[in-house]
Amino acid sequence: MNNIQLSYNIERRDFSRAGEASSNIKKALRQLGVNSATIRRVAVATYEAEMNIIIHSEGGTIGVTVDVDKIRIDAKDTGPGIENIEMAMKEGYSTATSEVRELGFGAGMGLPNMKRCADEFSIESSKGNPTKVSIIIYQ
Amino acid sequence: MLVKELIQALDLEVIAGIEGEDREITGVYISDLLSWVMANLQAGNVWITIQTHVNVVAVALLGEASCMIIPEGAEIDENTIEKANQEKIPLLRSKLTAYQLALKIKEASNLK
Ligand SMILES: Nc1ncnc2c1ncn2[C@@H]1O[C@H](COP(=O)(O)OP(=O)(O)O)[C@@H](O)[C@H]1O
Ligand SMILES: [Mg+2]
């Protein structure tokens, strides 16, 4: 079987459509018959990736590759990058503005949640550069 | 317990998404921080939150909440109502606080 690829563009600060890409990914996986525990992990990871691109970046894409044995998620944006990744990975650490926090975002749990859902997790970023997060979830 | 039974028992105001009233309730989760909700809400949970902007509908769907209850009669954005109708997820409201709602749900159901 060939793998199946999905790709979504995510606009910066587009709160009106926030969650749309992850909702569409979830619907697609359900149609493909992926089991619900795996779908849940993918939903958490793609939702957090989508929100990070909307809130913290200049915009980007989320790609999902579905294989028989695993699902791969690639979130990429065009910057401005993360200066200190170790800090960003800490639970509760967030640079979100108070306006964004008032909406319930910016709990500083996004990257830790993504890592928790992942069998393999990698993040690549530095100040002034794109951020790339890759996640593999075995089904 | 089904969402429609909960609506009856607690006299909840139905704002949107009534088509989803036959969903089974598995428990209750209360939080306004969306990352916590995404990580911890269990499928079938009633989600009680004071957040009423449109993104809560996506969170409720991704987390497979059985319904959302907005406590304390808080005002709800028009596009949230539209989205909840589109997605057929019950969006309910009460004058009670989240705590009072949780107590009443426990009384009305066998939920732990
Ligand atoms: N795509 C990104 N581009 C730039 N900075 C990011 C990105 N993703 C995360 N960050 C940084 O890492 C921090 C922690 O991210 P996260 O754990 O998702 O928490 P939150 O999004 O709630 O702030 C963010 O506050 C932000 O400073
Ligand atoms: Mg985040």
Image (cartoon, coloured by chain):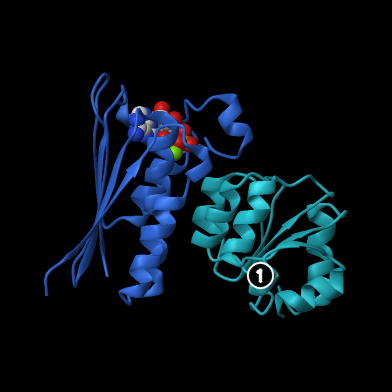
Residue furthest toward the top? Answer: A128
Give the image quarter of residue A64.
Answer: bottom left
Residue depicted at x 24% and y 29% = A130
Q: Residue furthest left?
A: A2
Q: In the image, what residue occupies the spot 84% across and 57% down?
A: B94
Q: Chain of mark 1?
A: B
Residue A72 visible here:
yes
**Can you give x and y, in whole percent of width and height, for residue B55 in the image?**
56, 47
> x, y (%) of residue B111?
72, 75
Report the chain shown in cyan. Answer: B
Q: In the rendering, at what x and y percent does residue A51 appear?
A: 44, 41
Quadrant where the image shows the N terminus of chain B: bottom right
Q: Which quadrant of the figure has residue A128? A: top left
In the figure, the shade used to draw chain A is blue
Vertical side of A28 occupied by A9: above or below: above
Q: Is residue A87 visible?
A: no
- Depicted A34 relative to depicted A128: above or below: below
Which residue lies under the disc numbered 1? B27
Using the image as rendered, state which of residue B60 and residue B105 is in the foreground.
B60
- Report the side of A136 relative to B57 (left or right): left
Q: Position of residue A92 (x, y in %)?
A: 50, 35
The crowding category of the residue bearing disc 1, from other C-alpha atoms within 10 Å (few below 14, some 14 to 19, many at least 20), is many
Three-letter amino acid code at disc 1?
Gly
Q: Residue drawn 59% across and 65% down?
A: B65
Locate the C terminus of chain B and report the quarter of the image it occupies.
bottom right
Task: Report helix, strand or loop for mark 1.
Answer: strand
The structure residue drawn at horizontal position 38% and vertical position 42%, both measured from the top left corner, is A111
- The quarter of the image that holds ligand 1 is top left
A47 relative to A63 in the view: left or right: right
